[in-house]
Amino acid sequence: MMNNISLDQPPLTACVICRDNRSSLWAEILLNNFHEVYVIASNSDYRKFNHSDTEGVIIPESKLPQSVDAIFFHSSDHLLWRNCPVKSQYIFEFNTPGTPEVQEGILPILRQTAPDFAIKSKDIQEIANYITGKYLSLPVICCQTLELLPAISLLCQAYLTVYLQQPKVWDSSWWLQGLGIYEYNQNQGDRLMSALDSEWQITRRNNHDKQEIITLIKHICLLINSVKPITPDIVKAAHQILSPQPCLQPIDLSSLPIPVQFNSILAIKGSRTSTATAMVVSTLLRIPIFLIDENKYRHHRKTNKKSVIVITESQLSHIPKLRLEGFSGAVLVLSSTPFSLLKQQYRVLRFGEGSHDCFDTHTALPLLLNQLAKLVPLEPENLQFLQKELKAVQKMRNMQITSCLENIKHLKKLPHEDAMRIKEIEQAIEQWRADARVACHTVVKIGDENKQLQQHLQTALNNISIQDHEQRYQAINKLETAFNHLQDLLQATGEKFISSY
């Protein structure tokens, strides 16, 4: 185990509150920068880890410290955290998909922790530096993924590649459309500047360097109704700041393989990075770009067969729905995760050899074209096989939801507890928590409480066994409401098709 503790760093302690085996994974990686790590796995299971006892030793509650430098708690173990005797000024919340809601006094860990534990040593070092005051900016792991800066970087590269051959890149409209803005107003400009400030803080770059990006954005916004062009010197200055590699000379497209099998490029609205990437591909390959509303997939069915869609990892849940609608084009996922790992997490990416790949937007533009050149459409038999499987999964999920709602209706009618039906509901909830992690971690309001859906479900299950008739009936109603929320969320996200998709 690597030890990154510097000699001038004060001894740091941490507490991990989690009932499953992620607690030991947290302890192992935290010891890179923390002297001691305490783990609370239940109301009676306490362990202490340090560099002498990396496997952890069991300790009584009385040996827990009153305070630590940082607490890391699993969203599902919120009550365990609330009731624990250990306190801290710095509290971090994590969940399975890496989607905790931002709450006052709690910092979200925006990384997946299961099935892959995506926390790196660098993340822990940044947390330690933040706690000790060495860094004033939030750790990157607590910040949303960069969208604007990678988008501007790609647009700069494309501009510098074709500005002599395609004058359309001189126009502000090309840049704005590449950033997902089709009707510009002052509010859009303010949002761009606000996004720049937020993302620049995440990068911890010198504020003086940011001025070149501000200058480019201002020119894009100010010249929207002007005949004046966006000039190469402004773009070069911005690109030099955004991209450390020396690729400012126009790329010779004739030396690169061009994916002629595609006649259009698609992107789903909502991501600047995917929109910018699609605009760049459209410009370089001189093929049309279509932006799809996530709820209106049928609009471009005629372009599906020879199209390639560019999406972010967070938009992957839309691919099963697109495949069911008949989309047979190739898929390029914008992600820094290696494709070998990505397709392990998403079964839908395993159908069709060469029909899916991923691209890291921090890499140079030629790699994007090289990867596109290797992609091929999904063969008809592969699409049909996938559609059959997706429909079977969808039918099974719908039956599970319907079965649970029927069981809940029976519980309302019965004067006494029905242990068998409650057991079936418990098993179904456990399965949904594994298969629909995004939906179950979504915060919804039931009554006066804003909680994760899985927390509502668990609270309702706990209260069903209460003898008081009124409280028990309220719990059953809450359970029914929670399942209706689950059904709506699964319909909206497409996650009911996923589990291993």
Image (cartoon, rainbow, N blue to C red):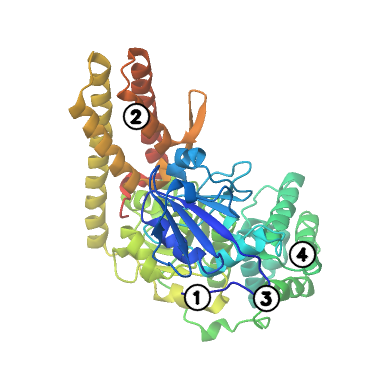
The amino acid type of the residue labelled 4 equals: Leu
Q: Residues within 10 Å of mark 4 (few under 14, many from 20)?
A: many
Q: Does the residue at mark 1 contact the one at mark 4 (Cβ under 8 Å)?
A: no
Disc 3 element? helix
Using the image, determine if residue 250 lies above or below residue 23: below
Q: Residue at x 23, y 52 (%)?
A: 389
CA separation, marks 3 and 2? 61 Å
Q: Earlier in the sequence, mark 1 or mark 4?
A: 1
Give the residue at mark 2: 462
Foreground: 126 or 491? 126
Q: Does the residue at mark 1 contact the one at mark 3 (Cβ under 8 Å)?
A: no
Q: Can you tell which quarter of the image residue 56 is in? A: bottom left
Q: Earlier in the sequence, mark 1 or mark 2?
A: 1
Residue 203 in sight in this render: yes
Give the residue at mark 3: 160
Foreground: 246 or 49? 49
Q: Can you tell which quarter of the image residue 244 is in? A: bottom right
Give the residue at mark 4: 216
CA separation, marks 3 and 4? 14 Å
The amino acid type of the residue labelled 2 equals: Asn
Residue 2, numbered circle: 1
Residue 295 in sight in this render: no
Q: Residues within 10 Å of mark 2 (few under 14, many from 20)?
A: few
Disc 4 element? helix
